[in-house]
Image: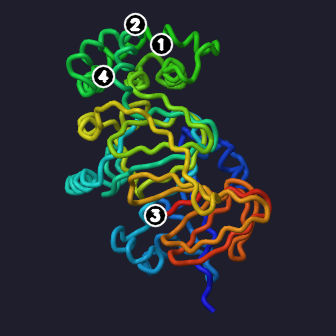
């Protein structure tokens, strides 16, 4: 009898400093410690591959796929990608992440080759390209979620530059040179000038922030929080503060999603999400970080255009038991499966699937499901999920 290719999957927790402490450990049924738990990775990225519980012995997911790619990924995905093309994560964002941009596939290939030729070690802190892949990504909010996403539309940015007294000196630059000229100016500005421009802003907004008088939909709230949380304080103000005023501040309610393509500048501000991306770790940073910022490389890859944020609500499929969030990315698709007690969901995987149970209880092919359990399903495998209590599953796959 052929064994079912539906396995428990054990991911890797990443302890980045911006993460919360309790959300991910509690979801996984692990003790809460004094170490932040920022991300839970479910994937085959070489820097932190997940582990499959097979009947013989635990095996790393990347090794399992490499042994029979056409069988596990499916012939089409194996031919196109040669590896699991996506990385699935749960994020708990307590403090703001760095402002960042991801390169296109073609640019990532060039950048990766260039840095390899220059002999820059893969783990060097000043390296931009960790691999040769692009990194489009989608996030689905698990809580109230706030993020920066793309440049404000023209009329809104013009209004901001006129209404915020400390930024009025930049209005003429934006009028003459547009998004590129404005962003280049602040990213190349000498640190003394950054301090001189932003200190009066800090002096004005910090008292209101500390007194709880600012709202999260206002850039002043996030700018003040960034300044308040920065160990450098007012000595060396972060030029990423400018971007908080230049970009859209987006709110996503639980279950709402937003897609970020190559070149769109963005930063997560607060909340928990399920994030799905191409299998890459390429990040070009633009501030709100002590990490490496390469301004020429950032300017080369940023899309200097107005962005009107598009919130995805999910489209019902599979008799309404599943909601799909379609994007233009060929590497991945995310969906949610919602089953009431006693309901059954049956499917044959047309591509490899990775799941995480968000809430509830159930069974799939003899494996028990409960909050925090991750599952990997090989391509071609048929399965049947039965819900015990109301069951919510997030599912990553290939379109």
Q: Earlier in the sequence, mark 2 or mark 3?
A: 2
Q: Nearer the viewer, residue 289 or 322?
A: 322
Q: Can you say which quadrant of the picture contains the N terminus? A: bottom right
Relative to 332, say whether 201 is above or below. above
Q: Residue at x 69, y 71 (%)?
A: 364
Residue 129: x and y in percent read 31, 51
**Which numbered dot is residue 202?**
1
Label 4–label 2 contact, CB within 8 A: no
Q: Nearer the viewer, mark 1 or mark 3?
A: 3
Residue 296: x and y in percent read 23, 36
Q: Earlier in the sequence, mark 2 or mark 1?
A: 2
Residue 264: x and y in percent read 36, 39
**Which numbered dot is residue 186?**
4
Q: Residue at x 46, y 23 (%)?
A: 232
The quadrant in which residue 73 appears is bottom left
Badge 2 crowding class, 10 Å Cα cut-off, few under 14, some 14 to 19, many 20 or more, is few
Badge 4 crowding class, 10 Å Cα cut-off, few under 14, some 14 to 19, many 20 or more, is some
Q: Earlier in the sequence, mark 3 or mark 4?
A: 4
Q: Residue at x 62, y 81 (%)?
A: 4
Query: In terms of secondary structure, where does tag 1 sit?
Result: helix
Q: Nearer the viewer, mark 4 or mark 2?
A: 2
Q: Disc 3 designates what residue? A: 398
Q: Disc 2 designates what residue? A: 165
Q: CA distance from mark 4 to mark 2?
A: 16 Å
Q: Nearer the viewer, residue 187 or 174?
A: 174
């Amino acid at each position: 009898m052929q064994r079912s290719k539906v396995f428990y999957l054990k991911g890797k927790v990443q302890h980045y400093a911006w993460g919360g402490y309790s959300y991910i450990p509690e979801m996984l049924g692990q003790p809460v410690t004094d170490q932040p738990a920022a991300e839970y990775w479910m994937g085959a990225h070489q820097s932190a591959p997940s582990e499959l519980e097979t009947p013989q012995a635990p095996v790393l997911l990347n090794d399992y796929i490499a042994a029979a790619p056409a069988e596990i990924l499916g012939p089409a995905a194996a031919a196109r990608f040669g590896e699991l093309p996506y990385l699935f994560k749960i994020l708990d964002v307590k403090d703001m992440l760095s402002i960042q941009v991801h390169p296109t596939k073609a640019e990532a290939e060039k950048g990766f080759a260039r840095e390899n030729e220059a002999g820059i070690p893969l783990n060097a802190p000043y390296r931009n390209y960790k691999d040769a892949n692009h990194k489009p990504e989608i996030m689905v909010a698990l809580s109230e979620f706030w993020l920066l996403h793309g440049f404000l539309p023209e009329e809104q940015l013009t209004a901001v530059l006129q209404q915020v007294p400390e930024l009025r000196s930049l209005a003429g630059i934006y009028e003459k040179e547009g998004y590129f000229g404005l962003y280049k100016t602040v990213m190349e500005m000498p640190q003394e000038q950054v301090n001189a421009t932003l200190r009066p802003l800090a002096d004005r907004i910090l008292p209101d922030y500390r007194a709880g008088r600012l709202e999260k939909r206002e850039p002043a709230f996030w700018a003040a929080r960034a300044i308040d949380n920065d160990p450098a304080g007012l000595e060396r103000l972060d030029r990423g503060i400018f971007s908080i005023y230049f970009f859209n501040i987006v709110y996503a309610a639980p279950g709402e999603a937003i897609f970020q393509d190559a070149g769109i500048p963005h930063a997560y501000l607060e909340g928990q999400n399920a994030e799905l991306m191409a299998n890459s770790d390429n990040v070009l940073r633009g501030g709100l970080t002590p990490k490496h910022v390469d301004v020429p490389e950032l300017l080369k890859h940023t899309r200097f255009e107005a962005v009107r944020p598009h919130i995805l609500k999910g489209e019902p499929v599979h008799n309404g038991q599943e909601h799909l969030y379609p994007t233009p990315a060929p590497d991945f698709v995310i969906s949610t499966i919602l089953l009431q007690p006693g309901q059954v969901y049956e499917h044959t995987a047309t591509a490899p699937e990775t799941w995480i149970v968000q809430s509830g209880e159930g069974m799939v092919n003899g494996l028990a499901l409960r909050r925090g359990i991750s599952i990997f399903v090989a391509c071609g495998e048929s399965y049947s999920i039965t819900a015990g209590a109301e069951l919510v599953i997030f599912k990553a796959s290939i379109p």
